[in-house]
Amino acid sequence: MDEQVKTLMDALSKAVLALNSAPRFKVSSESMDSYQIAAQCTHVLNIAGARANVQTRDIGLAIRDFCIDRHISVFTEDIKGNLTEHESERSINSINAHDPTNLIFSLDNGQEFIVKVIAVCS
């Protein structure tokens, strides 16, 4: 691979890391936000063969991208872990992905919860 292409792909990889580490923001000159641009750059890197293996953090980022701007159904759980009743629908206000393996979801009622991506070896 040409040295200039390697340098460009390395810079693009770092830009993706920076975009995914920052809180989501709109890009005024595009009809996209920072997470969508990061996903598009990752797609280009994958096509170019810069990143063949999926990492644990990529799973966290995929979860973030899937859940952003969605609603969550909130259920009550009894002491045995059985779902007892549907309480409400909540909007996801934001998802903090500074650590993509420990996503912090913030809901419209102020509630926060953590989604952990854990590798389990069998």
Image: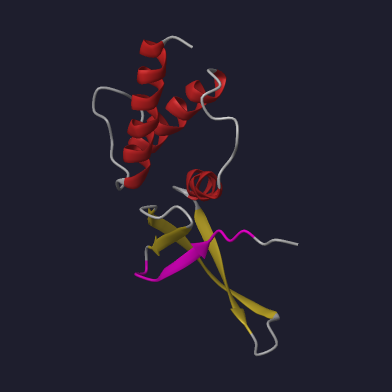
Q: Which residues are magenta?
A: 109-119
In the rendered image, the residue lying farthest to the bottom is 79
Judge whether residue 116 is colored magenta.
Answer: yes
How many labels were placed on the picture? Answer: 0
Q: Residue at x 42, y 57 (%)?
A: 92
Q: Is residue 40 left or right of residue 56?
A: left
The answer to whether residue 15 is magenta is no
| Residue placed furthest toward the right | 122
User: x, y (%) of residue 24?
Assistant: 32, 44
Q: Nearer the viewer, residue 90 or 96?
A: 96
Quadrant location of residue 121? bottom right
- 86 up-or-down from 29: above or below: below
Q: Residue at horizontal 62%, vertical 58%?
A: 119
Specify the farthest residue to the top: 2
Which image quarter: residue 10?
A: top left
Against 28, residue 87 (above or below) is: below
- The x and y percentages for residue 82 are 71, 81
Residue at 40 percent across and 63 percent down: it is 107
In front of the other: 42 or 13: 13
